[in-house]
Amino acid sequence: MTSGNISETHVGLYVQSLQSTFAPEVMVDLVCYLRLYLELSIQAKGILLMRQAGFEAPVDPEVKEKFEELRQLEKNIGATGKLALLPFLHTSTRDLWQLHMLEVRT
């Protein structure tokens, strides 16, 4: 997503299709929300894998700020924006638990 090739993917095409529905400033927040949510999800899974391998992952001092930013972006995009991103958000109970585990570590 950060490499700049997202427009060539199914996700990128879907996000581009949302441009006719949302204002430009909301589109920026939608992309930021998706990027940050995925980043935190990957970080949480990485911590769990490290623990499973017997390593203790260091606490990332930026995680708290990232969750605060995520909450602000969620307010900015609103319920409709979050619903639009739902196909790309991992929202199973297990996935949400992993994010919660990451947040409470800070």
Image (tube, rainbow, N blue to C red):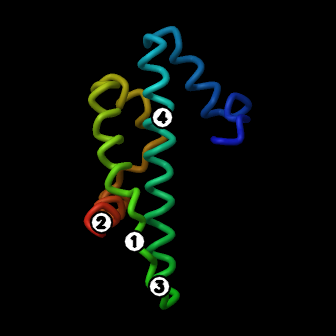
Asked if residue 86 lies left or right of residue 10, the reply is: left
As drawn, 30 above or below 49: above
Indicate which label's residue lies in the foreground, 3 or 4.
4
Q: Quadrant of the C terminus?
A: bottom left
Q: Nearer the viewer, residue 3 or 11?
A: 3
- Percent across and percent down for residue 64 are 32, 55
Marks 3 and 2, how far apart at CA: 20 Å
Dot 2 crowding, Cα within 10 Å, few <14, some 14–19, many 20+: few
| Disc marking residue 106 | 2
Residue under label 4, please give it: 32
- Percent across and percent down for residue 15 are 56, 25
Marks 1 and 3, how far apart at CA: 16 Å
Residue under label 1, please give it: 59
Which residue is found at the position 44% from the left and 33% from the top? 85
Q: Sequence-wise, which precedes: disc 1 or disc 4? A: 4
- Percent across and percent down for residue 23 are 44, 10
- Percent across and percent down for residue 51 are 45, 83
Asked if residue 44 lies left or right of residue 104, the reply is: right
Residue under label 3, please give it: 52
Q: Amino acid at mark 4?
A: Cys
- Marks 3/2 in contact by CB < 8 Å: the verdict is no
Q: Sequence-wise, which precedes: disc 3 or disc 2? A: 3
